Amino acid sequence: MRLFTPGEVVVRREVLHGKVWSEMPTRVVVDEPGLLAVFVEPGTRLTYPDHHHPHPWDKPARGFWRGHGKLMLHRPRDAYSVDLFWKGDDRQFGNYYLNLQAPYRRVEDGFETLDHALDYTLAPDGTWEQRDLDEFEEQVASGKYSAREAEAIRAEAVEIEKMLASGEIWWDTAWADWQPPAVWR
């Protein structure tokens, strides 16, 4: 599968039980063998096709991305992305958000994954916390994941906690200063 061109718009799809669960266009920042970085622009439309397991964001208020957008860093085979968020009128870096998800899989017009609900936030000062454990366990109980998949997700969470506790992150913290090119606005 080809590498995407910086600036190209590609689709990020979540696929659940073989069927598209959500879609959002993203803008390619970097695509190289060890890193796929994409940006969700403010105002990006989010779509949720009909599915037997409704997406939790499928509400009128969640139809468009709000805020300053988010930058998502993906490494091949990682079962999470590192998302960067900014806040305030002056677009100050807010935090890293480690989003547990299926390792991304390239397709012709973008990439596919599946959000696993369980997440971590990492503040600029190095403090971190787990998020959405209750939501994850509810989704396990509802059949979104098999017992084997749930155990693999929990094991990934343990590895992320070890990384965060050690303070030895793999991504370049200079990404916190990244700005989308003016032509994208």
Image (cartoon, rainbow, N blue to C red):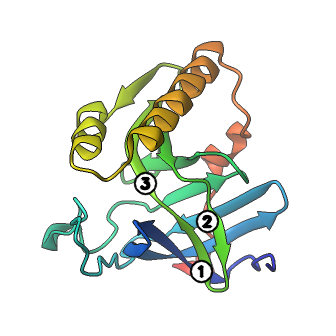
The residue mark sitting in front, 3 or 2, is 3
Quarter location, residue 8: bottom right
Q: Of label 3 and label 2, which has the lower sequence position? A: 2
Q: Secondary structure at mark 3?
A: strand
User: Residue 10: which numbered mark, if any?
Assistant: 1
**Residue 171 placed where, x, y %?**
72, 39
What residue did someone put label 3 on? Answer: 115
Residue lying furthest top in this view? 166
Q: Residue sitting at 35 percent across and 60 percent down? A: 67
Q: Nearer the viewer, residue 144 or 156?
A: 144
Q: Amino acid at mark 3?
A: Asp
Q: Of label 1 and label 3, which has the lower sequence position? A: 1
Instruction: Answer whether residue 94 is visible to the viewer in this image.
Output: no
**Residue 140 placed where, x, y %?**
29, 42
**Distance Cα–Cα, label 2 vs label 1:** 9 Å
Quarter location, residue 42: bottom left
**Distance Cα–Cα, label 3 vs label 2:** 16 Å
> What crowding class fits label 3: few (fewer than 14 Cα within 10 Å), some (14-19), or many (20 or more)?
many
Quarter location, residue 20: bottom left
- Image-based side of 16 in relation to 152, left or right: left
What residue did someone put label 2 on? Answer: 38
> What crowding class fits label 2: few (fewer than 14 Cα within 10 Å), some (14-19), or many (20 or more)?
many
Instruction: Answer whether residue 64 is visible to the viewer in this image.
Output: yes
Q: Amino acid at mark 1?
A: Val
Answer yes or no: do the residues labelled 2 and 1 have beta carbons within 8 Å?
yes
